[in-house]
Image (cartoon, rainbow, N blue to C red):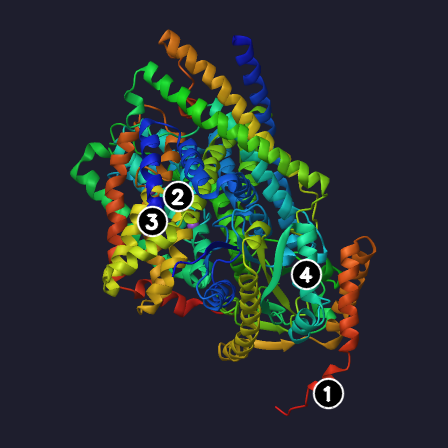
Amino acid sequence: EEPVHNFKMATGWAGGPLSTIGAQAFADNVEQISNGRIKVQVFTGGALGNALKVSETVKNGVAEMGHTWMGYDWGKDSTTVLFGGYAGSPDSERMLHWLYQGGGVELQREFREEKFEVISFPLFIRTAEVFLHSRKPVKTLEDLQGLKLRTAGAWLEMSASLGAAPVTTPGGDVYPMLERGAIDATEWGTPWENISPGFHKVAKYVIIPGIHQPVAPFELVINKTAWGTLSDQDKQAVETAAKLTTLNSWLRIGQEDAKAMKFYVAEGNEIIELDPEVQFKAQEIAKTWAEKQATDNEWFARVYKNQQEFLALWEDADSYRKVLTRK
Amino acid sequence: MQAILNLIDRIIGSTGVVGAWLVAPLVLASCYEVIARYVFNTPTIWAFELGYMLTGANFLLGMAYALRERSHIRIEIFYQHFTPRVRAIVDILTYVVIVIPICAWLTYGLYEYAINAFLSRETTGMSAWNPPIWPFRVSFALGFLALALQALAELIRAIQILRNGVEHDSPDVADDIFTHQAETP
Amino acid sequence: MSLFPLYMFPLLFALLLVGVPVAFAMMFTATVFGYMVFDQALIHQFIEKISDVASNYVLAAVTLFVFMGCMLERAGIAKRLFEAMHLWTRRVPGGLALGTILMCIVFAASTGVIGATEVVVGLLAVPIMMKYKYDNGLMAGTICAGGSLGTMIPPSVVVVIMGPLAQVSVGDLLLGMIFPGLIMASLYMAYIVIRCIIQPSAGPVIHAGDEPELPLSEKLRITATALVPPMLMVFAVLGSIMLGLASPTEAAALGAAGAVLLTIFYGQFSLTVLHQAFLKTLRITAMIMTILLAGSMLTGIFIGSGGVILTEELVGASNLSPWGLLGVVLLMAFVGGAFLDWISVILIMIPMFTPIMVSMGFDPVWFCILFLIVIQTSYLTPPMAPAIFYLRGITPKSVTTVQMYKGVLPFIGLQVLTLILVMYFPNLVLWLPDKLLGFS
Ligand code: NA
Ligand code: NA
């Protein structure tokens, strides 16, 4: 049977897990769940439009669907950072619960439709990133002073508040700069995703956990006209496929990250866990930043409040969900 | 007619000079970043974004100037053997069918793109500097507007050639490089 | 199977042959076919492409290296440099061409952008080779092929873009390309010497009678004043990367500033000189980037109209052996590179074929380097031959474009020879990354 809907999907990805177990997995799932009525063709980053402006590509109808990280749009509205994850976000387990049980999905849909004129669902979720692949050991606040770390987006400002000397540079320059010591350290993605760029080959220390990005939910954006052509049943198929893909990505990354950490040790890297003082300091800085945003952005205030209420509900979760285990 | 041509040439000359001199702040900003980072350990928050903006604005403003100076490359396998009249016809069709309509269309779209960014107070979102993006986008629109304008001047010239059958010998860019080289002591 | 994406090539080809400027021919083809695919949304796609290309900081290196070349040339340093090199190489057949390849290796090692290497070296080499009556074809081939070494000798913008697309470490690629890059450069030099021995008029030896031999001390003095300062500047570009002072893009800015300082040092600096250098930089970079922009628009339409799916279906239907498929893929890259710019070829083919190659048991790093070598040919193969466009931009009309196309042919052959060598001896690629990479 011929597909009823042939959709193009713009992404921001050149390859890697975001592409394979994110965008492409969604395309496979939605085709299966819709009994072949919806066929999605995935395009690499930058093929259809600008890799960092996928929501624009989709809103303008260049592609019917898109897979992106909402935080890329923070220049248009800082609320996107709350959905995309930042230093003040909870871990991925809590984030998933907020999204699917705490009202996050509904807020995301309403916010994106009202402010960006696209339909949005969570699609794919990253666990905590590697904080840094570093040429110097970093454990304390003292170690961070003047550390030349490469990063992007809002964390630039926040890491400067921690005393670091953040550097902005194009993605392609990161590797040679780290190799030669023009920068001391860089962040990138989760342990699994960082194997491919090979930073572990030129920087000895792997600094964890990713306090700058404890979680990163990604999103499916859909053109409103295209969405309107779907039957209720097909809309349901899209939602179900997105949720299934998101949960599967979380499971897979968890397993692959565990293997990746063993891999780094085997490669001769030294794993360093940041002192609690650094982790708490990062959260304080993020909190200050978020509260400032909330004062002059209604949407930010609304989503922030909802997240804070959810986190208050979960504040004792570790005591009843986590059992101590001996190594 | 000649007055119009001269006016356009002067306008594009000026946008070219503005675009060309953007390389100066590009060199300065990038070198300053290296010194600030390596010597003083205080990398800037603005050098990266300023760098790509100057690079982009430089070449966009230069498109029209490059057309005026005959710097846009064409494959000359057959073109160089055409008579001046045939060449003029190719050029007229190029400007009327391709360059002027596409540039006018893009200028209009890019103008709206810049206006929308201005009205929504959009910022770049690329770094902590995060400046408003509309001035950069104005350079997009200006670049294509200037290209359309220069194409209009070239169109008029090509029509003159078609009428007279004589080509004014346009200065070849490469030749002046070459002459200069040969003269250097 | 819809062949629609392929239909845009006859139109593009026709426009190019009639003599429509390359950038405009590509924009028009993209517009016509784009309207059929995207309808009203097309303008948004083009606007995004414009913003994408205009916001690419890596491209600043193109502008900066072009400016560096223009400034060096304005200062008269070019002439001194080549005259000095000439003192040492003039007794060798094709000496100036050999010197050019050596210059290209040095510049290639300090820049990752092909246009930059070629323009810098070309501005230095063209006038002097013409003065000594080198064969126009040999001159064009030497500069085009040598200039494109910029991507084959690290650092290289191409592998930096290729690595993530192939999910391969950029570090492995940068090291893996060293031997193939040096082999390619050596083949160029061997060819130049052999050709000029067989056909002395192609690269005339300057006889002792024409130019009396200077005493060694005089030679050294001239070399010190002419050769050493610019070489120091080149090494400053390379060194600032190697010593960890600067990113490759920033190193270009240091080089540009160094070129200005050198003109001051040589007493050639004035505001007029600076102004002229800025204007020429603008002409060259605007030409390069407009083609890049138009190519990016055209690629978007090719991909958006189903070009990738079509290619995959064609491969799937072919039922080839692993080596057969590898050959077909490289051939497709070769043909693709004749019509599209390198970014388009990589953007379309690498994500599509690397997983297939890996599943057939080939090493992805090795495959990427083979692909990179084919990308080298794309600079030289008509009709879309950026290396020739750059050369056209800096060469007087007396050297015809046809002479250029003919002149690069032997060098394309040498690139294919390098490709075959690397195919037969994968360790040329794989040995070095294995030995060298690591932290200390
Ligand atoms: Na290079
Ligand atoms: Na080519």
Label 3 CA crowd tier, 10 Å (few <14, some 14–19, many 20+): few
Q: CA distance from mark 4 to mark 3?
A: 38 Å
Q: Amino acid at mark 4?
A: Gln
Q: Quadrant of residue C371?
A: bottom left
Instruction: Look at the picture and state if C135 lies above or below C177.
Output: above
| Beta carbon at label 4 within 8 Å of ligand 1 | no
Mark 4 chain: A
Q: CA distance from mark 1 to mark 4?
A: 29 Å
Do pointers 3 and 2 mark residues of a single chain? yes
Left or right relative to A148: residue B106: left
Residue under numbered circle 3: C2
Q: Is residue C165 visible?
A: yes
Of marks 1 and 4, which one's residue comes earlier in the chain?
Answer: 4
Q: Is residue A147 visible?
A: no
Residue under numbered circle 1: A320
Do pointers 4 and 2 mark residues of a single chain? no
Residue under numbered circle 4: A108
Do pointers 4 and 3 mark residues of a single chain? no
Left or right relative to A180: residue C155: left
Residue found 42% across the figure and 67% down from its top: C436
Q: Residue furthest top?
A: B164
| Mark 2, secondary structure of its residue | loop
Label 1 CA crowd tier, 10 Å (few <14, some 14–19, many 20+): few
